[in-house]
Image (spheres, rainbow, N blue to C red):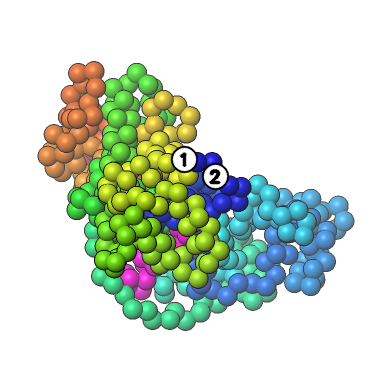
């Protein structure tokens, strides 16, 4: 069926199976947005934030704003220099919204949150930061205390922080007291994602805090992406979903048997996730009790509408529009796993395996987890900035033997980069071999490629030919 102009997005139906799923506009979902939504509720937003944003586009007018008047002495010919300076410091990724009165949001987005007062919730992350916030609130450590130190230093120890604190007269944005909330016990992938993020929340107030904030943004985004893809498989089958990541850089040539193996593994990973989405949708709809007096032809509609009303509570217009979109797909139908598979692939929903792969690749490219969207051999890769985040998120404040790191990366997130400490993985990964290449040889080669990269960028130290350790927070 053709979708009506302005019709509700298809994402609510998919989120019945997986609340972490991101909609089709994945190109707008970047790590910076997730970080803002994760941390914003802990810090009062500075009222002059819009004036600071305007500095990047029109310094002359912005400096006349009451929130910035008298803050700097700027000569008439220095306005462009101010714009470049503010842009470089607070918009390194060129993601700052323009004032709506001056043309609305352009190609950019939110300020880089050097200090807490610059944190502001945004609707541009499709709920990713909020989901991670809910996850961490069930992880009982002192992470909120460390988050406060990270975003609210009492004094500036570096020029970037000093400049940001000068812009917001209230200092760095004092942290509000957290409100205790009832928690649930985390397990499996949820627990591993929480532990990983916890390790990245460093209570540092020196010059290293800017790098720590950037690592946290990338780490939250990475862990949320793994939860989005592998979470449904774990909930469906009770097992970890494994995927091979190419350890070298650049990402290899199409003729390389290792590249072909990683691409086959990626396709299998996506297929497993898609299948589990369909089964979880079936199970969660089946759990809805429908009175016996309701005709069979109307039971599926009742189940779907009930789940949607839970998901879209308080969003009456979105609920109505989504129900209208789905009515032709549910009226007169009966619930079955086959129906769930068919409806996900229907034109109105468009959630095929290919579409899931597209979303994952688009998201992964933003943190160096996926090879670029173009190309016939999609696969996971580990770009150098992401490697830094992975090492520090897994090793924490200690060092770790390289073999243990490889094993932890697999056991915690399902990412296979080598044999590690358990050669049982060889039999599983053998199904992705190609052109007669031996799985063990491919795994050991991949593991060595990654080890050499870690050594080269200073994320590991070799103490002998057989012993290498990765370095966490120092």
The residue sitting at 38% across, 45% down in the picture is 343
> Could you tell whether 229 is left or right of 412 in the image?
right
- C-alpha span from label 2 to label 1: 8 Å
Residue 196 in magenta stretch: no
Give the image location of residue 447, x and y in percent: 26, 35
- Checking the image for residue 347, the label placed there is 1
Q: In the image shown, does 223 or 103 lie closer to the viewer?
A: 103
User: Can you say whether 244 is above or below 111 in the image?
Assistant: above
The residue sitting at 47% across, 33% down in the picture is 373
Quadrant containing the C terminus is bottom left
In the structure shown, which secondary structural element does the residue marked by tag 1 occupy? Answer: loop
In the structure shown, which secondary structural element does the residue marked by tag 2 occupy? Answer: loop
- Checking the image for residue 3, the label placed there is 2
Q: In the image shown, does 474 or 200 lie closer to the viewer?
A: 200
Give the image location of residue 69, x and y in percent: 80, 70
Q: Which one is earlier in the sequence, the residue at label 2 or at label 1?
A: 2
Q: In which quarter of the image is residue 117?
A: bottom right
Q: How crowded is mark 2: few (under 14 residues within 10 Å), some or many (20 or more)?
A: few
Residues at badges 2 and 1 in contact (C-beta under 8 Å)? yes
Q: How crowded is mark 1: few (under 14 residues within 10 Å), some or many (20 or more)?
A: some
The residue sitting at 36% across, 58% down in the picture is 298
Give the image location of residue 50, x and y in percent: 70, 64
Residue 135 in magenta stretch: yes
Question: In the image, which residues are magenta?
Answer: 126-142
- Checking the image for residue 284, the label placed there is none
Q: In the image shown, does 397 or 243 lie closer to the viewer?
A: 243
């Amino acid at each position: 069926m053709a979708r009506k102009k302005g019709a509700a997005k298809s994402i609510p139906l998919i989120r019945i199976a997986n609340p972490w799923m991101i909609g089709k506009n994945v190109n707008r979902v970047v790590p910076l947005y997730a970080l803002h939504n994760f941390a914003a509720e802990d810090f009062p937003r500075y009222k002059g934030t819009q004036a600071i944003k305007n500095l990047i586009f029109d310094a002359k007018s912005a400096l006349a704003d009451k929130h910035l008047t008298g803050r700097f002495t700027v000569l008439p010919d220095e306005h462009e220099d101010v714009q470049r300076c503010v842009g470089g410091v607070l918009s390194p990724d060129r993601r700052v919204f323009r004032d709506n009165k001056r043309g609305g949001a352009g190609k950019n987005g939110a300020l880089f949150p050097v200090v807490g007062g610059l944190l502001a919730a945004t609707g541009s992350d499709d709920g990713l930061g909020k989901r991670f916030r809910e996850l961490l609130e069930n992880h009982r450590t002192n992470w909120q205390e460390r988050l406060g130190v990270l975003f609210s230093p009492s004094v500036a120890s570096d020029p970037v922080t000093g400049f940001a604190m000068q812009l917001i007269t209230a200092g760095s944005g004092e942290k509000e007291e957290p409100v205790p909330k009832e928690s649930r016990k985390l397990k499996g992938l949820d627990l591993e994602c929480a532990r990983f993020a916890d390790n990245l929340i460093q209570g540092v107030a020196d010059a290293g805090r800017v790098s720590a904030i950037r690592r946290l943004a990338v780490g939250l985004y990475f862990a949320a992406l793994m939860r989005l893809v592998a979470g449904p498989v774990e909930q469906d089958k009770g097992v970890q979903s494994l995927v091979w990541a190419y350890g070298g850089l650049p990402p290899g040539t199409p003729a390389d048997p290792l590249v072909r193996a990683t691409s086959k593994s990626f396709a299998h990973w996506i297929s497993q996730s898609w299948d589990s989405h369909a089964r979880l949708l079936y199970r969660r709809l089946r759990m809805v009790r429908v009175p016996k007096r309701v005709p069979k032809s109307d039971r599926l509609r009742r189940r779907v509408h009930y789940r949607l009303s839970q998901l879209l509570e308080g969003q009456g217009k979105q609920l109505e529009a989504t129900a209208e979109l789905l009515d032709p797909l549910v009226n007169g139908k009966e619930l079955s796993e086959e129906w769930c598979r068919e409806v996900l692939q229907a034109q109105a929903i468009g959630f095929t395996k290919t579409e899931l792969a597209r979303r994952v690749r688009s998201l992964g490219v933003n943190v160096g987890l996926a090879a670029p969207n173009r190309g016939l051999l999609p696969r996971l890769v580990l770009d150098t900035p992401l490697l830094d985040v992975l090492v520090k998120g897994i090793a924490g404040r200690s060092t770790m033997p390289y073999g243990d790191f490889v094993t932890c990366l697999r056991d915690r997130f399902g990412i296979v980069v080598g044999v590690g400490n358990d050669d049982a993985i060889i039999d599983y990964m053998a199904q992705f071999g190609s052109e007669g290449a031996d799985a063990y040889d491919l795994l050991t080669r991949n593991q060595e490629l990654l080890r050499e990269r870690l050594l080269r960028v200073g994320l590991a130290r070799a103490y002998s030919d057989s012993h290498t350790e990765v370095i966490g927070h120092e």
